[in-house]
Image: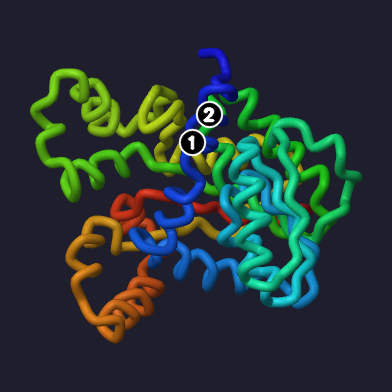
Amino acid sequence: MQEKKDEIRSHYNANPQKEWDRLKKKHPYEKYITIRMMDRYIKPGDRILDIGGGPGHYAIHYAKQGHGVTLLDLSDENVRFAKKKARQYGVKIAAEQGDAADLSRFADDSFDTVFLMGPLYHLMNEESRIRAIEEAKRVLKPGGFLFSSFILMFGGVVYGLRDLQETILMPREQQYFEVAAKDESLAFDAFTYSYMTTVRDAEQLLASVPGLSTETVFGQESILAPYRNELAKQPKKIRMAWYDYALRFCEKRDYLTHTEHLMIVSRKD
């Protein structure tokens, strides 16, 4: 399949606020768990490159912690939105439009930490995904950490059960349920053009790039994704208690299919 960068850019250009609200209102536990896991590895003063940083949630969070952060995103509107939000939060970030598969504007070994939290589930071909990882590794300093995110194929099943139960009867959805049942990965037109993977294929993709060693694999929503709607009804004290409890499960392989987004943490040798 050809890469669909224009279509993906148009999708995110249409409504940057929607993606901002996704992590702030609908999936706050995803950001909560992800940050606490990343904080195991990110050191004070690290220079961070946020590739596919969208509207700026993670870039702004780490800028507030005193890090120098550069955000790169395919969507022009996401870049503008991230700059606006950074000003609102009183922090400085560098934000640029660009392609994850071409980081030629950045020198080798120029960042302490690199986020690749979006491009790998919008690049339709494996050679493009490998290229994005290789570029992220190139600009990462030796000993630095790469954080790579994926959407799991089974995440679509979680979504259907939680939010759109009638999809199980829709003829056009049956091929996707079948792929998930066979534990296979697929690049297709979902909410936009997307690559959804199995845990196995995500791990094999990172392992195919020499010079990276896997530190951990975890579910960014841990066990909470199926219960989003119920959690949203609870008082903050109860929600936060479940978020903290879920941290204890996020790296356990038996529970990775409860999540929608998977993160692999790699160290550059």
Between 205 and 18, the residue placed more toward the observer is 18
Residue 129 percent location from the top left of the image? 61, 31
Compared to residue 41, the image places residue 162 above or below, namely above
Label 1, secondary structure: give it.
helix
Give the residue pinned by disc 2.
Answer: 10
Compared to residue 157, the image places residue 240 above or below, namely below
Under mark 1, the amino acid is Ala
- Circle 2 packing at 10 Å, graded few (<14), some (14-19), many (20+), is some
The answer, for residue 121, to whether it is visible in the render is no
Colouring mode (rainbow / by chain / secondary structure / one colour): rainbow
Query: What residue do we see at 57% from left, 30% from top?
Result: 9
Residue 40 percent location from the top left of the image? 61, 73
Q: Are marks 2 and 1 in contact (CB under 8 Å)?
A: yes
Residue 41 percent location from the top left of the image? 66, 69
Residue 260: give its label.
none
Give the residue pinned by disc 1.
Answer: 14
Query: What residue do we see at 41% from left, 34% from top?
Result: 196
Label 2, secondary structure: give it.
helix
- Circle 1 packing at 10 Å, graded few (<14), some (14-19), many (20+), is few
Compared to residue 26, the image places residue 191 above or below, namely above
Left or right, 99 with reference to 39: right
Left or right, 169 with reference to 94: left
The answer, for residue 134, to whether it is visible in the render is yes
